Amino acid sequence: MMDEIASHIIDIVANSVSAKATHISVDITQNTEKNLLTLRIKDNGVGMDETTKQKVLDPFYTTKKGKKVGLGIPLLKGTAETTNGTFCLSSITGQGTEIFATFDLSHPDLPPLGNIRDTILVLVVGNPDTDFCFCIKADAKEFTLDTKEIKNLLDGVPINHPEVITFLTKCIDENM
Amino acid sequence: MNLEELKKIREKAQKDVELRQKQARIRIVVGMGTSGIAAGARDVLKTLLEEIGRRNLTDVIVTQTGEKGLASQEPLVEVYEEGKPLVVYGNMNQERAKRVVVEHVVNGNPVTEFALEVM
């Protein structure tokens, strides 16, 4: 099991990047009243056929060369199911993949959400050619970060420029 | 989001962007596969960004990649520099990341103490 939900996010997003996604959306919703945490990661990558979709839940299956295991998806599914949650993977070849997981918010085995700010930064800066849309909802509070919008405003200045990184850090800190 | 602030950054940064886009002097790649993440790769990447930002090293870029097949040595960091051998660092942590920026990136001396490979 990963030590944070944030680590699962980085891991699943890495799969999307490997699947040549140019746009990835990450939605995290925490609803205390419903005792529910949901995570949705959706990409526009190459997608999977039916056979691959069945196999990705097997930890001993991977599409990557030089590896014998593919733990990212099985680990997330395991965390969701351990916390009385659900896991759903849908994918269409040529269109993309969507992973939706729910977690029982008060379950003792639910790992902490973790450092979402650093997770967002690392993903955005580490994958400068990919557009991300993060939507983080914690009860009444909501934060959205759309890197495509930011890149348009930057007009050619890379999103991984040190001053832009400082700006993003501040922006996330002030709004989350 | 403060759009005015972002516009100011854009105007200021556009001056060095041309140079940066032509060729980054150094490219640092952090392995962010499952084992790398579990071993702390996110904090390593974040530390690299902080150290580079602190020194305003606009000709250095940091990106991420998947697993490299060396799970026992994760987190792994590769440093690519034009005209110099590739250096692969293993078992990285935040302290080591700081040393790589100071000693290797800034001063040009690879940290042999935790370099796994120089090729």
Image (spheres, rainbow, N blue to C red):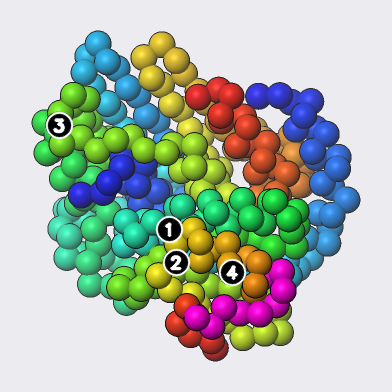
* Nearer-N-terminus badge (2/4): 2
Where residue A156 appears, as percent x and y from the top left, is 76, 47
Magenta extent: B105-113
- Quarter occupied by residue A149: top right
Read off the residue under disc 4.
B100
Chain ID at mark 4? B
Q: Nearer the viewer, residue A101 or B91?
A: B91
Disc 3 + disc 1, Cβ < 8 Å: no
Q: Which label number is shown at residue B83? A: none
Residue lying furthest right in this view? B15
Where residue B76 appears, as percent x and y from the top left, is 44, 69
* Nearer-N-terminus badge (4/1): 1
Read off the residue under disc 2.
B92
Where residue A100 appears, as percent x and y from the top left, is 28, 35
Q: CA distance from mark 3 to mark 1?
A: 26 Å
Q: CA distance from mark 2 to mark 3?
A: 31 Å
